[in-house]
Image (spheres, coloured by chain):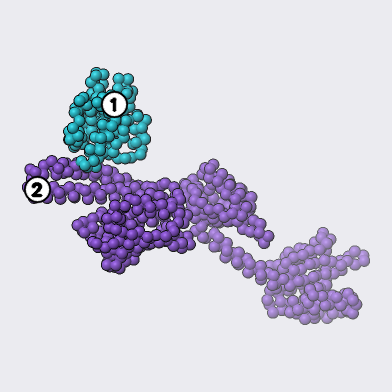
Chain colours: A purple, B cyan
Amino acid sequence: MSKKLSTEHKLKPAIELNSEFGNSFQFAAIGMALVNQDGRWIAVNTSLCKILGYSEEELQSLTFQDITHPDDLEKDLEFAKQLINREIDSYQIEKRYIKKSDQPIWINLTGTAIWNEDGSFRYFIAQIQDISLRKEALERLADRERLFRSIFNSTFQFIGFLDKDGVLQEANQTALDFAGIKLEDVAGKYFWDCYWWQISKETQEKLKYSVERAAKGEFVAYEVEVWGRNQVPSTIVFNLKPVFNAENNVLALIAEGRLIQDIVETRNELIQKNQELEQFTSIASHDLREPLRMMKSFGELLQRNYSQKLDEKGIKYINMMVGATRRMGNLIEDLLRYSRLGNDLTPLEEVSVADLLSEIKGLYGELIDEKNATLRYGNLPVIQGRRLPLQLLFQNLIGNALKYQAPGNLPLISIEVEDVGSFWKFSIADNGIGIDKKYLEDVFSLFKRLHTNQEYPGTGLGLSLCKKIVYQHGGEIWIESEFGKGSTVYFTIKKQ
Amino acid sequence: MKTYTFLLIEDNEGDVLLMSEALEESGIPFRLIGLQTGQEAIDKINQFDQSELPDLVILDINLPVKNGFEVMREIRNNPKTAALPVMILSTSSNQEDRRKAGQFQPKLFYTKPSDFGEFPALVEAIVSILPKELEK
C-alpha cells in the first residue's frame, strides 16, 4: 500500500519542490496540503507536520479521514463531496484532528480544488490553521460567561439590560420568576411596557422618564410598587445605571431592583404604631389636663379664701396638694410637647442659631439676671432645620445649664460650634453641679431624674425631648461631665 | 349699673362654678345661666324673646351630642340671634379649632385658664368685648 503510494508520488510530482511556488508551499506559516479524491495526503508542508506532530512520510501514508475527530468527519466529507461535484468552490470549517500524540487539536480548514485540463478533479488544496489557542480562549470565555450568567440568574436582585432607548435585552431569572413570566414575554419590548410596570400608567410614565434621564448618563434611583406574580403589588428599590463606552457615550442601561416589601410593611406598621402612640399620648394628656385644672383651681380657691378657717396642718396639706397638681401640669405639658414633636412634618427652613439664642436669652432674662449668669458664644451659623424644635432644644439645654447650679454659683455657659463636614457639631458647656459618670447614659431616657423636686424641680423629659429633636435632625447627642465641675452637652445637626 | 346676662354653655360643672366665682370676685353685676349641652342651649336660645337675649354667649367647643361649632351655626342661622355676641372657650389652643370657629365670627377665641389665678384675665377679656353702649 505504502509502496504504491510512493510510486504514484514519484510518477506525478504534485509540487515542484525547488520552484518558487514549492518553497512558498513548503515554508508557509499555515499548514498546507494536497489531498487526493480518497482523502490521502499527497503533499504536506512543514507547518502542517508541526501542527499534527507527524512527519511528512507518516502523513503521506494516512488519509484525512484517519486523523479527523470522529465527531467532525461527517460534515467535512459532506463539504468535500460538494466540492468535487462542483456545487461549491470552496469551504471553510472548524474541526478537530487527532494529533500523533492522540490529542485532539482544533484547526480551521479551508478546502478548495484543483482541476485537470479535461475538467476532471485532481486534488484538494487544504489550508489548515491551528486555532487551538483561540478555541481555548473561547472555552474560557464561555466558562466565564456561564459563571457570570449563574450569578446574574441566581442573585436575589432583579437585573435587566436595556439598550439606551429602553428596550429590554435581558432579564435575570430572579426578575422573571418574581413575575412568573418568560424572557420571550418581555425581551425586545420597551421596558416600561413589560409586565412588571403595567401596574399603573403613572408607574410606566415615571419609568419612561427615568430611562430618558439614565440614557443621558444620570444614575436614577427610586422606590416603586411593581407587579409580581398574579398582579400582586410589591415595593422595590429600583435603579437605572448607565454603562459608558470608551468614548464616554451611554452604551446601555443596567436596571436593578431589590424587593423591600418586608421593610415597607414593617415601616408602615411602625409608622402606624407611632401614630397611635402619639395619639394616645396626646389624648391622654388632654384628658388628664381637664381634671387637673379643676384640682388646681379649687385648691387655689381653698388656699385663698379658706386659709383662715384651717389650722397650720390643713394649710400645709392644701399647699402640698396644689404643689403636686402644678408639677403634674408641667409633666403633662412636657409630654404633650414630646408627642407633638413626633408628628412634626413641617419642612426644613433656614434657622439662625444666633437669633434663636437671643430669643432664649430674652425668655430666661429674669433667671439670668437673678443668678447673674453669663452666656458666651461667638459666630454661629445659619442651619437647615425646624425652627420650633431647634429652639426647644437650645432652650432646654441652656435651661438645664442655668438650673443645675450649686446655690450661689455664678453660672457660666459657653456655646460653641464646629463645622465637621456634613454635620454641625454644637457644644453647650456649663460650670454647674455635673453628673456622676454612672448616670451619663441614663439622662436621655424618658422620665429619668437624678434629683428630688426640692433640690431641682423637673419632669425628667427635657433631655429625652432634646434627643428626639437631635435625632429628627439626623444627629447624635451626648454628655461629658465631671461631677462637681460642670457638664458639656454635645450634639450634631446634619447639614441638608 | 346694668346686670349682664351671660349664657355659659359648658358641660364641666367645675368650670361653671369657677366662672361664677371669678365673675363674683370681679364685682360686675351679672346673671349666669349655665347649660350643659349644645341642644339645651339651642332650645333655650330659641325660647328667648328679643329682650331676654343674653349679653354674651360663652361657648365651650367639646360638648356632648351637639358641639360648639354646631351651636354657633344655629345661632348664626337664626335671624333673631344672628348678631348675638359669642365667645369661644376652648381647652386647646388648637389652630384647627380656631380656624373652624373663625367662620362663625366669634367675638373672641379664648383658651381655658389652667388655674384659678388666670381667671381675672379671662373676666377682663369678657368685659372688653361687651357691647360698648351697655358698659356704662
Check disc 1: other Cα within 10 Å, few if <14, some if 14-19, many if 20+. few
Q: Is residue A132 left or right of residue A115?
A: left
Rendered image: mark on residue B131: 1
Rendered image: mark on residue A314: 2
Q: Is residue A27 above or below residue B41?
A: below
Q: Looking at this view, is A187 or A53 the one in front?
A: A187
- Residue at 45% x, 49% y: name it: A349
Residue A161 lies in quadrant? bottom right
Q: Is residue A32 left or right of residue B98?
A: right
Residue A486 lies in quadrant? bottom left
Looking at the rendered structure, the kind of residue marked 2 is: Gly
Task: For residue B14, say whether it is visible.
Answer: yes
What chain does badge 1 belong to? B
Query: Considering the image in quadrants, where does the N terminus of chain A appear?
Result: bottom right
Closer to the eye: label 1 or 2: 1
What chain does badge 2 belong to? A
